[in-house]
Image (tube, rainbow, N blue to C red):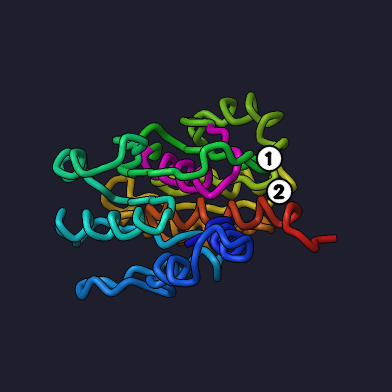
Amino acid sequence: MNPRSLEKILKDLHRQKITPQQAMKKLQTLPYENLEFAKVDHHRGLRVGMPEVVYCQGKTVAQIKKIIQSMNRVGLSVLATKLSKDNFRKLKSSLPKISEYNETAQTLVIEKNKRQKKSGLIIIISAGTADIPVAEEAAVTAQLLGSKVETIFDVGVAGIHRLLDNLEQVRKARVVIVVAGMEGALASVVGGMVDKPIVAVPTSIGYGTSFGGVSALLTMLNSCAPGMAVVNIDNGFGAGSMAHRINILGDSPGTE
């Protein structure tokens, strides 16, 4: 349930287009639907501005399918993350035609409001090509939530001139997401060149002493560049969500 669909139900009831019983039926899954193995939070969009997201790792195909069907029944947009290509193939026949699977990001999107105008601008930068899957997850997330997104890939510090060639574009953003593995230095470099809030995402890309992304995480946490926040390793979804919330602050009703 999202604010628009709830408002429509209330208006239809007020105009006597539906009966109180029909309205109750539409609202009966608020605030959540109990599937025993999962309690699907249909009320989350009303509370925090974005629907519950399906994290697919650790779930069976049958469980993922039932959660998506539950969200579909109440008209929610769906974002499923960390969905493997093999599991998507097993789900495909049960999904609506508007479903979009991004193999690189391992995301599934069922967007119910594609006509929504995208707000502001988030620029997503990846240090290397190997960081693109995490950057793509961030992009898919922010776009579904309603932000305009542009990407700049493979501009890491080993060839810093590649970033400098794109600085004019970067400076147009309201928010910048920087995705980097190895030593994670790119976030600090960008933070020293732009006046926009930065969401830094360490990735698990790197050789042995990168410790699965811990080296990049520590570099970003210890950055001397101001205005930077850091999310967890490989957490493109978290970065996209945070950047979106910052991006739309000036568009929110009542904001001065």
- How far across and how far down the image is residue 190, in percent? 62, 43
Asked whether, in this view, residue 194 is left or right of residue 124, the answer is right
* Mark count: 2
Q: Residues within 10 Å of mark 2 (few under 14, many from 20)?
A: some
| Residue depicted at x 35% and y 53% | 72
CA distance for labels 1 and 2: 7 Å
- How far across and how far down the image is residue 166, in percent? 63, 27
| Residue depicted at x 29% and y 55% | 68
Location of the C terminus by quadrant is: bottom right
Asked whether, in this view, residue 48 is left or right of residue 133, the answer is right
In this rendering, the answer to whether 103 lies above or below 47 is above
User: Which of the 4 quarters of the picture holds residue 47?
Assistant: bottom right
Q: Is the residue under label 2 in contact with that under label 1 (CB below 8 Å)?
A: yes
Badge 1 element:
loop
Mark 1 or 2, closer to the camera? 1
Badge 2 element:
loop
Q: Which residues are magenta?
A: 133-151
Q: Is residue 117 magenta?
A: no
Asked whether, in this view, residue 223 is left or right of residue 1, the answer is right
Residue that mark 1 sits on? 173
Observer able to see residue 49: no
Asked whether, in this view, residue 242 is left or right of residue 32, the answer is right
Q: Residues within 10 Å of mark 1 (few under 14, many from 20)?
A: many
The disc placed on residue 8 is: none
| Residue depicted at x 37% and y 59% | 214
Observer able to see residue 37: yes
Residue that mark 2 sits on? 196
| Residue depicted at x 68% and y 58% | 226
- Amino acid at dot 1: Ala
